[in-house]
Structure formats: structure tokens, C-alpha cells
């Protein structure tokens, strides 16, 4: 699936479509710095009715949010990790094995530690628009 986002208001509908079409609660976000990964995660959390403030976990590595229905959402940002071992040390496998939503920014940093059940979102920046591609894990 592919969407073209020409302004921020497009992202609201795109985030709804992503949630409706994902085959898993696990999504890895790929894109350059400033592509809009965190912004998209914020909108996904909005549609999941997350009651916590959603912000980039750049320094904390993982943020845990709770929704109105008491569901947990994990949001990872691996940009600042220096090695895969750091991800292992935070108990990555425990998070990934839960049935909760997991949103992962900068998944390439952990390479093969990312399980195969993750869907992928690729965000490409072209001039003033974003091209958002969803790849399902099936």
C-alpha cells in the first residue's frame, strides 16, 4: 500500500488506513531524519486512543503509553544505540513478544533482532511531500 502525503492533514487519514490494513500490531518505521516517523506514530497513537503524551523516545530508547481501554503501546527509537547488545540489554525480546502495539523507529540499528512479524512503513521525502509505503509481513 502506498500513500502520498502533501500536508499534515493527510496524515490523519493515512494513519487510520495503516491501522486498518496492518496484519500485525508491530510496525517498523524507516525514513531519514525529519521524514515524519514520530509524527506518524503520534497519529497512530491518537487513533488508538492513547491518553499519555506521545513523544520521541530518542533518549529513553522506549516509551510506554496507555490507551483509554488500558492497552499498552510501546514506542522505540534506536537512533542513539551504539550496538545491538544495548537493545538486548533493555529486554527487547520481552517487549517484542508481548501482544501489545510496538512502534519502532530506526529499526535498521538493531538489524536481525527485529522479528519477522513486523510490518514496515517506509517514508520517503520528495520536495514538499512524503511518500508512505506499508509493507505487510505476510
Image (spheres, helix red, strand yellow):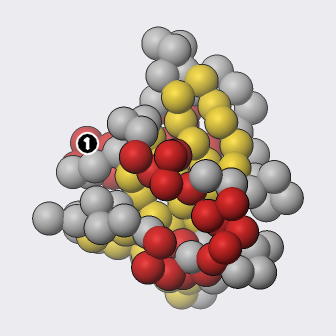
Q: Which residue is mark 1?
A: 20
Query: Looking at the image, is 59 positioned above or below residue 101?
Result: below
Q: Give the left or right position of residue 138, taking residue 65 as reference.
A: left
Location of residue 55 in the rendering, given as x and y in whole percent from the top left corner: 75, 46
Image-quadrant location for residue 133: bottom left
Badge 1: how crowded within 10 Å, few (<14), some, or many (20+)?
Answer: few
Q: Of all residues shown, which one is farthest toward the bottom? A: 126
Q: Which SS class for mark 1?
A: helix
Query: Looking at the image, is 95 positioned above or below residue 38?
Result: above
Let me know if residue 27 appears in the view: yes
Number of marks in the rendered image? 1
Looking at this view, is 85 or 106 the one in front? 85
Looking at this view, is 88 or 64 the one in front? 88
Q: Quadrant of the N terminus?
A: bottom left
Q: Residue at x 52, y 28 (%)?
A: 72
Looking at this view, is 30 or 91 the one in front? 91
Looking at this view, is 64 or 93 the one in front? 93
Q: Residue at x 69, y 60 (%)?
A: 89
Location of residue 30 in the rendering, given as x and y in whole percent from the top left corner: 51, 75
Q: Residue at x 56, y 56 (%)?
A: 92
Location of residue 113 in the rendering, given as x and y in whole percent from the top left corner: 47, 72
Location of residue 109 in the rendering, given as x and y in whole percent from the top left corner: 61, 80
Let me know if residue 130 appears in the view: no
Q: Give the left or right position of residue 34, taking residue 70 as reference.
A: right
Image-quadrant location for residue 42: top right
Q: Of all residues shown, which one is farthest toward the top? A: 69
Query: Looking at the image, is 74 positioned above or below residue 138?
Result: above
Q: Residue at x 22, y 65 (%)?
A: 137
Q: Quadrant of the C terminus?
A: bottom left
Q: Of all residues shown, which one is farthest toward the left? A: 138
Amino acid at each position: 500500500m502506498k500513500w502520498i502525503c502533501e500536508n499534515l492533514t493527510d496524515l490523519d487519514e493515512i494513519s487510520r488506513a495503516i491501522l486498518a490494513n496492518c496484519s500485525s500490531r508491530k510496525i517498523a518505521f524507516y525514513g531519514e531524519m525529519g521524514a515524519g516517523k514520530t509524527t506518524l506514530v503520534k497519529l497512530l497513537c491518537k487513533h488508538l486512543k492513547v491518553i499519555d503524551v506521545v513523544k520521541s523516545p530518542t533518549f529513553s530508547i522506549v516509551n510506554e503509553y496507555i490507551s483509554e481501554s488500558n492497552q499498552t503501546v510501546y514506542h522505540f527509537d534506536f537512533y542513539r544505540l551504539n550496538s545491538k547488545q544495548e537493545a538486548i540489554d533493555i529486554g527487547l525480546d520481552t517487549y517484542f513478544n508481548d501482544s501489545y502495539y510496538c512502534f519502532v523507529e530506526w529499526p535498521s540499528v538493531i538489524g536481525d533482532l527485529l522479528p519477522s512479524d513486523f510490518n514496515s512503513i517506509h517514508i520517503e521525502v520528495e520536495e514538499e511531500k512524503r511518500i508512505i509505503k506499508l509493507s505487510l509481513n505476510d
